[in-house]
Amino acid sequence: MRLHYVRRFSPGGTWEQDDSDNWIQATETSRGTVARRVPMNYQMGLGHERAQEGLRGRVGDFMSDNNQRDFYKRWAELIAEER
């Protein structure tokens, strides 16, 4: 986990803290006309998730949409509870 984190979020890593701005812009873009007509696809890594000792949730062996799938799964659970 430490090595993975250093490779991703260190000064020489591939992601930075300001990448959250990209997610905000992606969310705003999804409100557009074309985005409303085309369904989103969150299948990357589907079926390759596994439990990791010492970690909550599921992890994948490579880049995947686990986070997005779990986010919307939890959102649906919360919405269902409100009824």
Image (cartoon, grey):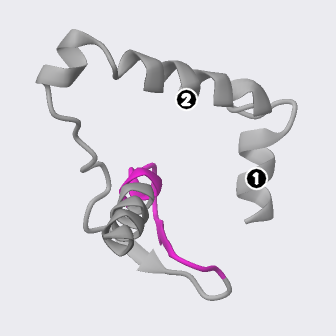
* Element carrying mark 2: helix
| Residue picked out by circle 2 | 23
Q: Please identify, in this view, whether the residue under mark 2 or under mark 1 is nearer the observer.
A: 2
The circle on residue 58 is none
Among all residues in the image, which is located at the extreme bottom? 53
Circle 2/circle 1 CB separation < 8 Å: no
Per the rendered image, the range of residues in magenta is 55-69
Disc 2/disc 1 C-alpha distance (Å): 19 Å
Which residue is found at the position 23% from the left and 20% from the top? 35
Q: Quadrant of the N terminus?
A: bottom right
- Residue 73: give x, y in percent of width and height: 35, 64
Q: Quadrant of the C terminus?
A: bottom left
Among all residues in the image, which is located at the extreme left? 37
Which residue is found at the position 78% from the left and 41% from the top? 9
Quarter assignment of residue 4: bottom right
Which residue is found at the position 24% from the left and 50% from the top? 43
Label 1 Cα neighbours within 10 Å, binned few <14 / some 14-19 / many ≥20: few
In the rendered image, residue 30 lying in the magenta stretch gets the answer no
Q: Amino acid at mark 1?
A: Tyr
Label 2 Cα neighbours within 10 Å, binned few <14 / some 14-19 / many ≥20: few
29 to 38, vertically: above or below: above
- Residue 76: give x, y in percent of width and height: 33, 62
Q: Is residue 66 left or right of residue 34?
A: right
Among all residues in the image, which is located at the extreme front? 83
Which residue is found at the position 28% from the left and 46% from the top? 42
8 to 35, vertically: above or below: below
The circle on residue 5 is 1
Q: Is residue 10 left or right of residue 36?
A: right
Q: Mark 1 or mark 2, which is nearer the start of the sequence?
A: 1
Among all residues in the image, which is located at the extreme top? 33
Q: Is residue 32 left or right of residue 59?
A: left
Q: Amino acid at mark 2?
A: Trp
